[in-house]
Image (cartoon, rainbow, N blue to C red):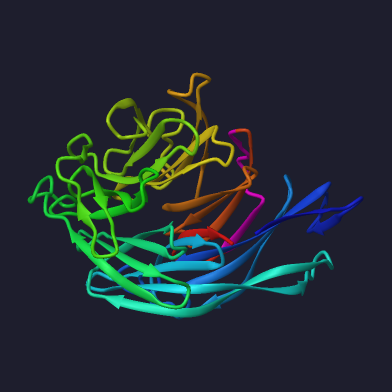
């Protein structure tokens, strides 16, 4: 939920600095955090937080509204209407949780205005014996139910569930078999890392497998999902595809390659590579964490207006990079980047105006002003949270 509060005058004094704000945006979002070993050095109680952002171009404030301990290691969110679906990952087992989003009138301490404040009400939790649930997506079905698809990294499995608003039932699963190199560290077995709806046909899914350098086509149904034979996209060997996004209006898709730190621009049907871009070329490759031993791409997003594609790097180089889609709508052109905290696992662009970054290893959120592809280098707000790894606007 995003709202705009207009004021003839709004002033705030912090230390010796005074800010004049012409308007202020208010947004609420959930943040998922790792809470359990081996993902964190010390166990934490709360895995989900609702956070409130109040911000203008020059000033921002982040506040924790509520926190939840229904699951551990909340790794990904997907929202559909007034339902929020969350997956929890462990190396051997996982779970999916269905929340109802409730909204209550509450008066803002800062502005004095009545706001619709969101809270989460636990409706259903299903545990299953596949490790590493790391991505969840929701498809609205013709019968008004929802198909919830979960990618499980450690087990190399796609799990599908069905929700009618009251129940959450399993539809079946697909176990992937192929891997790139059994002797390698990250591609020694299948590692499903992302699942998205690929076209208008009901149940038509694309599953990104980092361990196989493949994007599979899967047909989901009431009975069970199944792989479409001889229909996968092969990414460059050893590149480790992580996330896939389809452009909302243009015949383009974007595939983030984690292990090679690259971005592929593809045709929407994944039949053609249009462009391959390194995410570590100057001027965006400044090392800001020399103590880290790895380098990997992390997250991928498209701006609401469809003009910009954003990616994050994590490891020795930690940043978010912005590309603009060219006038012809095929090539990407570098626009800007911003250095982040350590390990920017996830980020969210709010109304194309504010970039919220979840820095997993520096344990904080950072908010930067975003304007037509340009990112202000100084954050307008920060908030300490333990191992934040995912965000969802409410």
Report the front residue among 359 and 332.
Answer: 332
Q: Is residue 61 left or right of residue 38?
A: right
* Residue 129 can be seen, yes or no: yes
- Name the residue: 36% across, 51% down: 202
Q: Is residue 381 above or below residue 170?
A: above
Based on the picture, tell me whether residue 374 belongs to the magenta stretch: yes
Q: What segment is highlighted magenta in the picture? A: 373-383
Q: Residue furthest right?
A: 8
Q: Is residue 129 left or right of residue 195?
A: left
Q: Position of residue 190 (x, y in %)?
A: 17, 54
Q: Position of residue 206 (x, y in %)?
A: 30, 47
Q: Residue furthest front?
A: 143
- Name the residue: 22% across, 74% down: 129
The quadrant where residue 73 appears:
bottom left
Q: Is residue 29 left or right of residue 8?
A: left
- Name the residue: 31% across, 44% down: 258
Q: Position of residue 286 (x, y in %)?
A: 43, 36
């Amino acid at each position: 939920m995003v709202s705009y509060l207009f004021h003839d005058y709004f002033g705030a004094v912090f230390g010796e600095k005074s800010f004049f704000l012409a308007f202020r945006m208010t947004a609420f979002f959930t943040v998922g955090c790792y809470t359990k070993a081996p993902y964190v050095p010390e166990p934490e109680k709360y895995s989900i937080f609702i956070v409130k952002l109040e911000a203008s171009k020059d000033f921002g404030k982040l506040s924790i509204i509520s926190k939840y301990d229904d699951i551990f290691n909340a790794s990904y969110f997907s929202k559909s209407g007034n339902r929020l679906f969350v997956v929890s990952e462990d190396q051997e087992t996982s779970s999916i949780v269905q929340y109802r989003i409730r909204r209550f009138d509450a008066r803002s301490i800062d502005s004095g205005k009545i706001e619709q404040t969101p809270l989460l009400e636990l409706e259903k939790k299903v545990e299953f014996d596949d490790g590493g649930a790391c991505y969840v997506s929701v498809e609205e079905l013709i019968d008004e139910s929802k198909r919830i698809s979960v990618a499980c990294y450690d087990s190399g499995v796609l799990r599908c569930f069905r929700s009618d608003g009251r129940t959450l039932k399993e539809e079946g699963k697909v176990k992937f078999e192929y891997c790139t190199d059994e002797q390698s560290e990250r591609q020694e077995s299948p590692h499903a890392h992302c699942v998205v709806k690929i076209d208008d046909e009901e149940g038509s899914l694309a599953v990104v497998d980092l361990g196989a350098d493949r994007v599979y086509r899967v047909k989901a149904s009431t009975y069970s999902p199944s792989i479409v034979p001889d229909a996968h996209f092969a990414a460059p060997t050893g590149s480790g595809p992580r996330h896939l996004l389809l452009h909302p209006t243009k015949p383009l898709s974007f595939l983030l390659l984690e292990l090679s730190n690259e971005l592929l621009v593809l045709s929407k049907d994944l039949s053609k590579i249009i462009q391959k871009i390194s995410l570590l070329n100057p001027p965006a490759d400044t090392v800001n964490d020399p103590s880290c031993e790895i380098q990997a791409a992390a997250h991928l997003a498209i701006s609401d207006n469809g003009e910009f594609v954003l990616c994050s790097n994590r490891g020795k180089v930690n940043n978010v990079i912005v590309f603009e889609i060219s006038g012809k709508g095929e090539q990407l052109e570098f626009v800007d980047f911003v250095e982040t905290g350590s390990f920017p696992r996830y980020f969210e662009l709010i109304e194309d105006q504010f970039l919220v970054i979840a820095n997993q290893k520096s344990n904080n959120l950072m908010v930067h002003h975003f304007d037509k592809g340009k990112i202000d280098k100084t954050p307008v707000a920060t908030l300490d949270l333990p191992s934040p790894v995912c965000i969802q606007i409410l």
